[in-house]
Amino acid sequence: MDKAIIVDHLVKNFEVTEKKPGLVSSFTSIFSPVKKTVRALRNISFTVEPGELVGFIGPNGAGKTTTLKVLSGLLYPTSGFTSVLEFDPWDRKPEFLKQISLVMGQKNQLWWDLPALETFELNRAIYELPKRDYQEALGELTELLGVKKILNIQVRRLSLGQRMRLELVAALIHRPKILFLDEPTLGLDLIAQQKMRDFIYEYNKRSGATILLTSHNMDDLINLARRVIVIDEGRIIFDGALEELVNRFAKEKIIKVSLSQEDDIKRIESIGKIKKIAFPEVILSVPRSATAVAAAELLQNFPVADLTIEEIPIEDVIRKVFRGEGRKKLLK
Amino acid sequence: MKKYLAIFRISFAQEFAYRLNFIMWRVRNIMQIILIFFLWNSVFSDPSRVVFGYDKARILTYVFGILIIKAIVLSARTVDVAGEISSGDLTNFLLKPVSYFKYWFTRDLSSKALNLSFAVVETTILYFILKPPFFFQTDVAQIMAFVFSLVLAIILFFGLLFLSNLITFWMPEQGWGLQFLLIVFTDFLSGGITPLDILPLVVQRILYALPFPYLLFFPLQVYLGKISGAMMWGGLLIAMAWVLVLMVALNFVWNKGIRKYEAVGR
């Protein structure tokens, strides 16, 4: 087996009924519902190697979660080919399901009224895990996530962060080879987020599992994903290394200058767009191709004490992608 | 098989998490029994009176019997399927190597076991307090046919209820309505309120072609010995045919439904 996941020309359309507000229109919609086709995925293709950790980014409604749902066999693709561990996800064969797991930020499988351990025991039976494997996985996971002490407490009495970590134990107790994570740090505080990230990184390294994750959390992507796939409006607009994304996307560079004495700001404006002035420091953004010229001009015509040229921070790039600005720039 | 044993166990534990709820529900049942007992007791104040072929002993046996059979046949957790589909919780099960039908059937059975054990205790206590004349079936063949008809009834109700829940795939907001309608109809058409043989013959004929009488009325009549021989076998055959029809329909609608499923609710 060479590829863990193959997606080829995948298309997924949803049919939704439009509902307008108001009593009259709710009534008329019973008899003549207005159907609309939403094209969630328009022909996407990619492959993932075993053991890779790939981050999906894109604005809301771009199709990230839909992709994960198709890959885990929840959604029936409109057309195209998908293969996960050489299974067709939609068949949902037990041998397939035993090797995957999908964790969605706010979807819980833990039994609300019972201690989490009960759910784990249930999963042990459902996944038909041998007692020893189960005990081993449970020990390892509860250790890594620091949840040993709360296994016997009713789930409803736990905090969100505690619950999320227990959800993760439940989702990983069968040691899936492929892990789909949808917004794994959503709603967690900073410390809990860090714990979750450390865990995902550790799990990927230790078990060699293939991990696909979507996130709106910058730190998740920067710290975890070596490769990112940018999806927008149901299309893949970038697929490659995270650093590569900056080169491809950022059409500008940042020049930071330290002036030795005050000067006319108007004159500096003619060289590049001023992003920030906090005298003596001025931060300019200039087109990538004109960087050298702009720097030379600054050095020549201004009382420069210090000058550095930097890339646009990756956070800014990703932030733009989330806002849906990637589409315009990258497709050109 | 072990999977479903674990599901049975956790479902049992879950019911116990709502102890007070459960006790209230049982209290309601006891009140119902006492109410119905005194109602029929006064109707049949003259012990030799016979109405629609029922004397006092038979009608009281019918009323008590219906309550126990209801506890077995109609107590079901499957009502929650609609909620799981519309909220997207179904996702959790689609991701696991487990049959969704068997999962809910197991949960039904665990609910039935719990309800039945309480119903038996309650009815025994009430029996000794109220001392109603009660009809005990002694014919072994009849008892076996009764048990078999009960098994069919359980599967039939499961199929009907599950099917009515599946409408949620197409109309996420309408799941409860159809279910409610089904339960109301079931209670009436299956003899939960009055014995069906007091209805006009034409109505009875039509009813017997439907699955409803085989849920409550038919099994009890078999127990009471009012239906036996060829008529009993005919009834069992119709019930079996309905089981088959419902299973095929369930599979068909399910397979259509999960294609529509959008796994919503992030």
Image (cartoon, coloured by chain):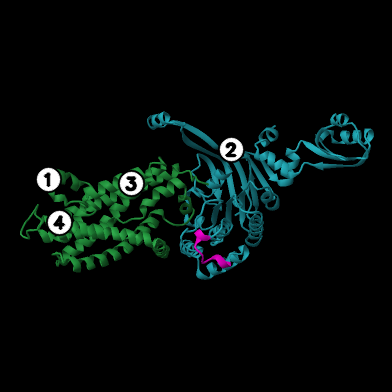
Q: Nearer the viewer, residue A88 or A299?
A: A299
Colour assignment, chain A: cyan
Name the residue type under label 1: Leu
Q: Which chain is green?
A: B
Q: Position of residue A148 (x, y in %)?
A: 58, 67
Would residue A14 appear left or right of A161 to someone viewing this image?
left
Identify the residue shown where x is 91% and y is 36%. Answer: A262
Marks 1 and 4: which is nearer the front? 4
Q: Chain of mark 2?
A: A
Q: Judge if badges 2 and 1 mark residues of a common chain.
A: no
Would residue A174 appear left or right of B219 to someone viewing this image?
right
Q: Judge if badges 4 and 3 mark residues of a common chain.
A: yes
The residue that label 3 is drawn on is B179
Instruction: Please give the range of residues in magenta.
Output: A148-157
With respect to residue B2, does B252 lie above or below? Answer: above
**Magenta run includes residue A150:** yes
**For the view shown, which residue lies furthest in the bottom direction?**
A132
Q: CA distance from mark 2 to mark 1?
A: 62 Å
Q: CA distance from mark 3 to mark 1?
A: 28 Å
Is tag 4's residue or tag 3's residue first in the polypeptide sequence? 4
Q: Judge if badges 1 and 4 mark residues of a common chain.
A: yes
The residue that label 4 is drawn on is B40
Query: Is there any visible trace of residue B247 in the rendered image?
Result: no
The residue that label 1 is drawn on is B201
Marks 3 and 2: which is nearer the front? 3
Q: Secondary structure at mark 2?
A: loop
Marks 4 and 3: which is nearer the front? 4
Marks 2 and 1: which is nearer the front? 1
Q: Nearer the viewer, residue A266 or A243?
A: A266
The residue that label 2 is drawn on is A234
